[in-house]
Image (spheres, rainbow, N blue to C red):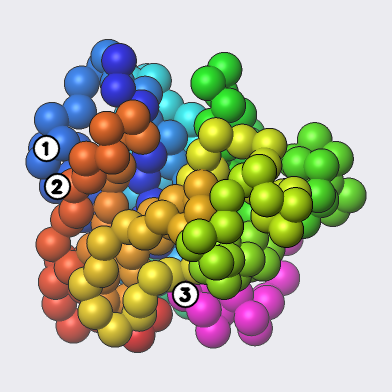
Amino acid sequence: MRTLVVGDIHSGVRALEQLMTKAKVTPNDHIVFLGDYVDAWSTAVETIDFLIQLESEYTCTFIRGNHDELCRAWLEDQKENPQWLAHGGMATRESYLNADRDKWDIHLKFYQNLKNYHLTNDNRLYLHAGYTNLKGVEYEYFEQSFYWDRTLWELASALDSDLTPNDPRFPKRLTHYKEVFIGHTPLSKNEFVHPQKKANVWNVDTGAAFKGGLTMLDVETKEYWQSDPVHTFYPGERGRN
């Protein structure tokens, strides 16, 4: 069984459908989605519908992203959040306002059941953004860090590549897990890019909300597949560009 990790989708369900075909995903595979399922393109409702259907046919793990949490909050009380609307929420709100209200309750359950992180028996950690506690995720003080933090990727990116985990200067945060897989911080907003590894952290957010593609990565072999640039599936839309 392959474990396939998918970066931030941002309502780009058409790109995800292409990836499922490109990677020849089967029910024997385990798909880990790193969050941010909505906010950018016009098919937010269709994206969540697709993921819910996917879970009935495949082994899936769904991680909570910050955009998912913002969307959940709006679905619960319809309170306007200017920050959310300015960063892709406008398209998501429009998508839900055009959907039957019975979808709202179904989707709310989906958002509420998302996981903050997923830690496997082979000591691989999957989460949307990061964590700040030096002892690891189980000791995190604020669960919002799991879907809002940017310092984990910043730390891994700034680390001297010659520094080994045995060096006393190596960040303790990175010593607890074999590998960490995250999204949240797009590797580029302006061009098509590939997933990147810094230290033992893999960033799989390749800018699907902007001008990049959507990425699916085999965590064992590191083979990966990418969709066409997601904006090409949505002509005439701005996404988050």
Of the residues shown, which amino acid type is indicated by label 3? Gly
Between 53 and 22, which is closer to the camera in this rendering?
Answer: 22
Give the percent coordinates (x, y) of residue 216. Answer: 28, 45
Residue occupying the far right of the picture: 141
Q: Residue at x 68, y 50 (%)?
A: 167
Structural distance between the alpha carbons of marks 2 and 3 = 22 Å
Instruction: Name the front one of labels 2 and 3.
Output: 2
Q: Which residue is mark 3?
A: 88
Between 185 and 103, which is closer to the camera in this rendering?
Answer: 185
Give the percent coordinates (x, y) of residue 14. Answer: 20, 54
Q: Quadrant of residue 31?
A: top left
Q: Residue at x 82, y 42 (%)?
A: 135
Of the residues shown, which amino acid type is indicated by label 1? Thr
Q: Quadrant of residue 49?
A: top left
Of the residues shown, which amino acid type is indicated by label 2? Gln
Q: Which residue is mark 1?
A: 21
Label 2 residue SS: helix
